[in-house]
Amino acid sequence: MDLKDLTFAAEQLLHAYTLTLDDGRYEEWPDFFTEDALYKVIARENFDRGLPLATMFCDGKGMMRDRVVAIREASIYAPAYLRHLVSSVRIAGQENESYRVESNYAVLSTRHNEETKVFNAGKYLDRIVFVNGAAKFKEKVVVYDTLQIPSLLVIPI
Amino acid sequence: MPAHRLPLSSYAWPKEGHCRIPYWVYWDPFVYEQEQAKIFRGPTWNYVGLEAELPNGGDFKTTFVGDTPVIVCRDHGGAINVLVNKCAHRGTTVCREPYGHARQFTCIYHQWCYDLKGNLVGVPFRSGVVESGRRVSGMPEDFKLEDHSMLKLKAEACNGVIFASFDQRMIPFRDYLGAKMFYYFERVFDGRELQFLGRTRQKMTCNWKLVFENIKDYHATLLHVFLVTFGLYRADQKSKVEIDDTGRHSVLVSRRGEPRPSEVTQEIGAFKSDYVLHDPSIITGRKEFKDEHTVVMQTVFPNLIIQQQTNTLALRQIVPLGPKEVELVWDFFGYRDDDAQMLDFRLKQSSLMGPAGLVTIDYAEAVEICQRGAEAKAQQCALLEMGGREVHDTDYMVTEAALRGFYRYYREIMGFE
């Protein structure tokens, strides 16, 4: 696959992924991943020091589905509209059948009758594979700069 | 004292005593200021970090005792020092990094320089400058470096956990906890070398006490759907509450039960019997302590919650950011000698805790609506009568005894009549 097609495929995947979250279609969120994928949201202060602790951690699609059930059934949080902005998508390398893709993101949050705030910002370090022609995340590591999370992190980034 | 400030004695505590909390404790700016002086800068031990985060001489982190910024560092003799992060010259923040390694701390403004013990070791132009062949200016002759150290707190590292106090006459940490509470502290911090796994932080819009006292009541058996449904913590499990003699520290202890419905779950709206995990490995763990307790939540006055939930271990540090805001910092750890499986358990189960924790995911909302309600100026106090009106240990968890103990002590240390 040439770089242009690959970049386009990565961008399409990222945009579909963030739109699904912004639309609140959480049940579809695990489908962007391979069965054994790793999803991790980690504070930059840990990532930079090589400390392993993640804020959100899903090792495989099962844990992602559990996270979705928890959002629906086991969480109490103030409702807000979330909006992801993704930029600077770059193919950073290739390892066997997977591609390393890096990008920047910001999540805006708008509570009802309040102004819009930047909830979280950081970078995505992804590994993308093609399963039957469809791009999927084999690994998604979300490294966030916004170390002090306002109230809670309920919805995946 | 400015005229608009009432003496503390004019803040009348409700006549029911420790069974009531007057809501002004959660928002009054003068009360907050007094808490900083009497509690955080008073005769208390405040958690500031783990020795494992500062393995080498020169390693440092910055944090807070109450709302006072401090540097915690290890010097080349191996000792831990806790210094108020404020230059003796103009009060500037000397160390501006969250963590790192330093030979010394130099203020960027006029380059006053301090060693790792906080001693002032250099002042540029101290003996003046040479101008047109003549030495001019400089500090007065009687200026002594040793009179202008950074303010040093009393520090004690107890089995790897670092505490600091503004009170230089502070009793040893072990005595401060008392034998009953030290037993639980030593259960986790038994002298084995710790491994710092990482940190998460969240900012909540509420008074710091709502976060501290949250661990002293019985909400967890009702609010946290995840805990209740999967039997991690439930009102019908073998459990107990223990309180130290002063009332300031306490511990909630429980043993994991079966994830099945019982008489108690019928009263709990949060229980969902059809809720099953796709991947139960998140709640799979291994026994690691000599007793059968799977949940031990210990509060150490005034700023620390020690958490054990199965194999996830954390120290939660409370940093007040004013009367109506607080940062909660979660320091997760294990032991240096953990095997690969245990490390895996700890990292997986940490998904239960923290700002995105499956268990604690409803925590911020509960304390924030408490705050909102407290600020409304109708109805003056909260009620603490679950389990009676006394302060004593219990062999069940549905009680507010630890909360009553806390407010009994709070009233005393603050001097509220």
Image (cartoon, coloured by chain):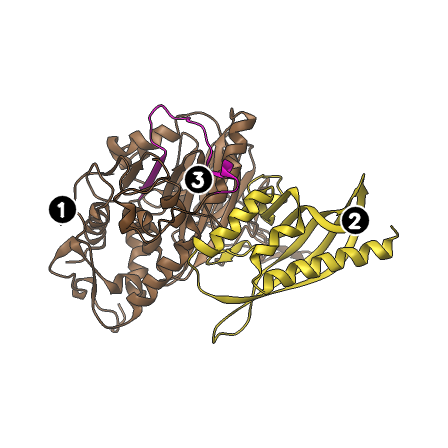
Quadrant (top left/top right/bottom left/bottom right) for the C terminus of chain B? bottom left
Which one of the lettered chains is coloured yellow? A
To which residue does mark 2 refer?
A92
Residue B192: in magenta span:
no
Label 3 sits on residue? B314
Instruction: Report x, y in % for residue B276.
Output: 46, 44
Task: State the residue in front, B92 or B299.
Answer: B299
Toward the viewer: A91 or B13? Answer: A91
The three-letter code of the residue at mark 2 reads Ala
- Letter of the chain that mark 1 sits on in the rendering: B
Determine the colour of chain B.
Answer: brown
The span shown in magenta is B277-300
Give neighbour class at mark 2: few <14, some 14-19, many 20+ (Cα, 10 Å). few
Above or below B188: residue B376: below
| Mark-to-mark CA distance, 3 and 1 | 30 Å
For the residues beneath circles 2 and 1, the answer to whether they share a chain is no
> Which residue is denoted by mark 1 in the rendering?
B390
Viewer-proximal residue, B385 or B127? Answer: B385
**SS state under label 1:** loop
Please state if A6 lies on the left or on the right of B356 as rendered. Answer: right
User: Badge 1: few (under 14), some or many (20 or more) residues near its Cα, within 10 Å?
Assistant: some
Q: CA distance from mark 2 to mark 3?
A: 36 Å
Residue B122 is left or right of residue B216, and the answer is: right
Residue sitting at x 65%, y 47%: A141
Spatial CA span between label 2 and label 1:
64 Å
Instruction: Tell me the quadrant of the picture where the N terminus of chain B can be found.
Output: bottom left
Q: Residue furthest bottom?
A: A113
Quarter of image, res B17: bottom left
Q: In the displayed image of the protein, which residue is found farthest to the left?
A: B15
